[in-house]
Image (cartoon, rainbow, N blue to C red):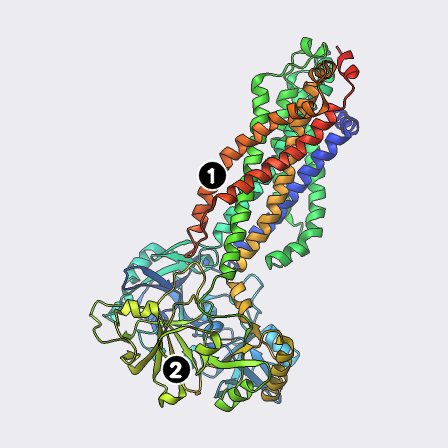
Amino acid sequence: MLRHNLLLIYRNFKRFKATFFINLFGLSTGLTCVLLIYLWVKDERGVDRFFDHGDRIYHVMQNMRGGDDKIGTGAGTPGPLAKALAEEIPEVEYAAAYVPYNIYGANTIITIDDKRFKVRTEFASADFFNVFSYKITGGDKVKPLDDRRSVVITEEMATKMFGTTDNVVGKTIGWTQGEASELFRIQAICQTPPVNATNQFDIILNYDFFLDKHDWLKTWTSSDPYAFVMLKEGTSPEAFEKKIVDFIKKWDKDSRSTLVIQRAADHYLYGRFENGKATGGRIEYIRLFGIIASFILVIASINYMNLSTARASRRIKEVGIKKAIGANRKSLAFQYLGESIVITVLAMGIAILLTDILLNPFNTITGKHLVLRLDAALMSVIILITVITGMLAGSYPALYLSGFNTATILKGKLNVAVGELWARKGLVIFQFAISVILIVAVLIVYKQIDYIQSKNLGYNRANVVHFETEKVSETFLSEIKSIPGVLNAARFYHDLTGSHGSTGDVRWEGKGLDDYVDFSNFEVGYDLIETMGFQVVQGKSMSRDFGSIDQIVFNEAAIKAMGLKDPVGQTITVWGIKRKVVGVVKDFNYESMYEKVKPAMFFLVPMIEGGPSRIMVKLQAGNERETLDRLKTFYVKNNPGFAFDFTFMDDDYQRLYASELRVSTLSQYFAGIAIVISCLGLFALASFTAERRLKEIGIRKVLGSSNASIVYLLSSEFTKIVAVAIAIALPVSYFMMKQWLGSFAYPIPLELWYFIVAGSVAILISWLTVGIQALKASYVNPVQCLKEE
């Protein structure tokens, strides 16, 4: 029986080649999209989820209530917190303090004999490797960070420095950062962090050594280090969070901060917080593309349904004869379901091949390292998708074709119920509604990304490069400024795209006991304000003529938050140090466009150990390449043995929106694919309608109707269908995009033209699709139409 059905399936595919290839194209295209999205989603959901006991590892963060009573959530916590939690909270099995590379680990040099290496340095307390299960592959596996002079290096770094991982433990290396220089002993070698780890490091130094270099981080008012805990098995995270919520107040009774925890593995996907609660992040894009994959699969299945039923008139006699000789509805339904499953299996085979071919460009777009491995897990998913798609696509044709009345169909007549016609039209309406929603989404996402990329941020990032250097001096900066093509240069710490410190330890005249403002602090050198083009609206910029480095400049948001009327000349105390306000700059965006401008301050720091070692250089437009070549020559001369690694500020800003840019690009591709597949569905319905109305067309032509009137007759019906789809899609798309834009602090307005363009594109596509079939029907010979019974 199975062999017989397979033979019939093969003959039907051979007989209806056009239908077969259209269905195969639609299904294979849809399944390719689904496989690519599945691989991407799987990789996203796997980030940071490779640690042993990952369900018990939590990041302890702090919620800080600002003067406007809004709660901000910070990843950093007081320096002593991790140790205190381990000692005083019995539910904590291990606790680790940790300082990420991007906070204090920049510009680190490792020296071995006469070789020097730039490395990503991080600092961690003794229990770091008990909390995070990076495998120790050599050396001390029990307490690799127990000694202040111990260092753990990755296998990759060991190979880079020594050419091998053998006999490396016990060797001494030199460590340099700015003016600081120390010797360390390699205590252990650990596995290199996998590509799906957000934390990428080269070496890890002892946390106590770090605190000795930064005394202020030993206080309970600091907030730079991270704290992680591994809870004991069986501990309720909710109960633990309630227990430690006011833990900081035990040590700092004036603190306005409370503690909150988040599973460490969840931060990558749920990294956005509002009023102290995780509200989303990358998980929103996973949901979005999960929905897109489902829609594309459903659209492709609808095409199969419509095209199969549209060609039903060619198969009614086959059905009638089979029923007449005893075939029941169940066996016929099984045959047609078999057809859809077989074609789906073929489509899946093509989809796997296409996925393998498209994976490299897909990785380029998404910034991933996805690999198509046909392991047991993926094969299970492929089989499941194939079966579901085959059953979904074949369900309606199987029920429809097997349900014809025997006597009626043997007469060669196909009576189409009104409900059946509306079912097909409803499916096409659904397809085009999704397509219109995707068109609207693509337009608005593109415009929003374009807006945030071109918005005036309050400073000029064009032609500004920055780089780290080993040592900085006034002479060094003067020589850079003298290079032809360099307009200005200055020292800077952190960056202007979100990596900056903050503090609430700021006091001013008239500050009340309940007044609290969290200030973003930028540690800078002279000329930074001029180099970046910040607009001074009161007072002046920092100057060497002032005679003291105790100068400070605030932005307008900070002055407003403090309630100062005439700020210039007033004395402000920051971290116990009195500083004089010399100027106020116009508000500028130094975080992503998801955030409003916050209070910020610039203050000078001397050229000492740990001071700003990042150099910001403004280049003359039009001569960037030549100027960079001169900068490279200068840099290599002053930093022998190191490559000139520079970054444009524009590139930093682009990285802020890497996820959005990728989503925008992927959305354009997937929207285009969905539209193409939807057009196949419309083509199917147009084909069905044309076949059903052939005699009517023949009669109209005999009575004098022109080809143009026939095309209009057929096209007008489908225009109404697409118009209904547009009417449904536009309000839905408006609501969806309003929600998405609501996550930005500076959204674009939802203008009417986005929706007019989307609707017009849908109409034009439908006219093109239907017009081809209508034109074909209009040229049919009326004699052929009328001679059939």
Q: Choose between 584 and 100: the one closer to the eye.
A: 584
Dot 2 lies on which element? Answer: loop
Q: Which residue is mark 2?
A: 542
The kind of residue tagged 2 is Met
Residue 117 place in picture, x, y as percent: 59, 81
Q: Is residue 670 left or right of residue 783?
A: left
Can residue 46 be seen here? The reply is no
Query: Real-space Cα distance between discs 1 and 2?
Result: 52 Å
Q: Choose between 526 and 69: the one closer to the eye.
A: 526
The kind of residue tagged 1 is Val
Q: Residue at x 63, y 77 (%)?
A: 160
Residue 221 place in picture, x, y as percent: 31, 73
Q: Choose between 340 and 263: the one closer to the eye.
A: 340
Q: Residue at x 33, y 55 (%)?
A: 238
Q: Which mark is residue 732?
A: 1
Q: Residue at x 53, y 59 (%)?
A: 50
Q: Quadrant of the N terminus?
A: top right
Would you call the spot at circle 1 few (<14 residues within 10 Å), some (14-19), or many (20 or more)? some
Q: Quadrant of residue 501?
A: bottom left
Q: Is residue 110 left or right of residue 591?
A: right
Residue 425 place in picture, x, y as percent: 58, 26
Q: Is residue 401 left or right of residue 118?
A: right
Can residue 661 be seen here? The reply is yes
Q: Which mark is residue 382?
A: none
Q: Residue at x 36, y 88 (%)?
A: 546
Would you call the spot at circle 2 few (<14 residues within 10 Å), some (14-19), or many (20 or more)? many
Count of numbered circles on the image: 2
Q: Work out whether 188 lies above or below 431.
A: below
Eye-nearest disc, 1 or 2? 2
Residue 269 place in picture, x, y as percent: 48, 55
